[in-house]
Amino acid sequence: MVLSYDLNKEAPVSIRSSALLLWGLLCVGCATATGSHGPGSASAVKVDPERLVSDRGAGPVLVGQKIGEGHLGGFESDADYSSLWDHGYFDAVGHRLILIKERELVALMSPQHRVQHLLVGASYRTSAGLGVGSTVRELARAYGAFVLEEQELPRSWIYRPDKVPEPENDWVTFGSLDQTDKKRLQCVGRSSRLAGVDFYFESCEKARSGASVEALVISSADVSDMQPVDPFLNLSTPPPCPAPRTEDPAELTREGHKRLYADRMGDYLAGRSIALGLPMLRDAALSGSTEAGMTYAGVIFTFVHQEVIGDPLDRVLTQGAQEALFFRILKVLRAPEPPPSDSCRAALIDFDTPINDEMFADTDDDGPPTGVCGGQYQFHWLSHADIEGIRQQARAWATCWPRP
């Protein structure tokens, strides 16, 4: 349900006039409390520029841009970007969530290291003096029409950086459960006068009853960094067989391996070699090379699932996770012999059985996983719907090339 409040009009939409009158009687002096000089006019409240929320960002940290070294910590902090990145974690989509503790900021970074979203502490205010702790009525008074909509804040996000305790050791990474008093936020409020700034409430019912803002999110309108790069998967409807990307998949596979392993040091691959070799192997795999597909999937598995350091080609993490699983299932389907009947591989190509929780169940103790595919990292970033779409496309494409 979408509900709009506009205190510039005679009555808020969907609210009876009698309720508005009572609300007005209870809110005598609200204009003074919020700094508003009249209905619909944002106040001239004095806000610390370092804690000012706007559609561009929070203080000097701007959405859609990289974070300058001088803005990574407090005014006396020696924080650097690489340390914040290393101590952060990935959300369910593939943003890297970093905590700039001294500034009371959480930044969700794109694969290209630009700020996609900012979540702020209670000290941050809009130019009208509003933020965490404000009510719908205060926001509508300052910004005019204010729309409430049921929408859940991703549970993997820390939304109150000011409520994340300092770790006992500086080498300890933090996670989504480290915020104290964390709630499930299921309602968002927006105003066209402050585009890109979302105010989250515990529920729309509570917001309408006077509950205050629990979280404030500033988002970049530029989502290009979060789009798939050269996508070939369609998780809703399998596309037709792909056009070959090379006339000689075997030769391209050899050249891709040569480029990929150039300058290798032990088990470590050079970044430039990955950037050159992995796309070649992807093209060879999409031209029918099972060998290229497995190498491609293996590198992605190491980066995404084993080391959890992001996609090796600096794309959204979920793209790599989806493609790696696709090529592995495709290999099973094209293999000359079927997999063991009690294996995860067999379960993935059992198209008579829908993807379900039991397949991926883990044990609560130190025993082995109870699900046939339990305990495997490659499924952690993917929803059941994703996995179903991936295996259906692998099924459709399994006959696009001759068996190896």
Image (cartoon, rainbow, N blue to C red):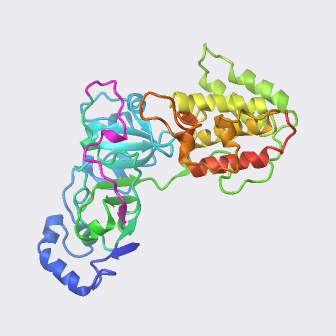
Residue 319, placed above or below residue 70:
below
Horizontally, residue 166 falls left or right of residue 334, namely left
Q: Is residue 283 magenta?
A: no
- Coordinates of residue 400 in the picture (x, y in percent): 83, 45
- In this orientation, does residue 266 appear? yes
**Residue at image coords 83%, 42%:** 244
Horizontally, residue 74 falls left or right of residue 33, namely right
Picture quarter with the C terminus? top right
Relative depth, front residue between 278 and 332: 332
State which quadrant residue 163 falls in.
top left
Residue 253, placed above or below residue 3:
above
Horizontally, residue 343 falls left or right of residue 368, namely right
- Coordinates of residue 225 in the picture (x, y in percent): 54, 46
Picture quarter with the N terminus? bottom left
Relative depth, front residue between 390 and 158: 390
- In this orientation, does residue 316 appear? no
State which quadrant residue 341 falls in.
top right
What count of labels does the image hold? Answer: 0
**Residue at image coords 37%, 57%:** 55
State which quadrant residue 339 falls in.
top right
Residue 2, placed above or below residue 92:
below
Would you say the magenta stretch is mainly helix, strand or loop?
A: loop
- Residue range in magenta is 168-189
Q: Is residue 171 magenta?
A: yes
- Coordinates of residue 251 in the picture (x, y in percent): 84, 27
Residue reaching furthest top?
Answer: 266
- Coordinates of residue 49 in the picture (x, y in percent): 25, 49
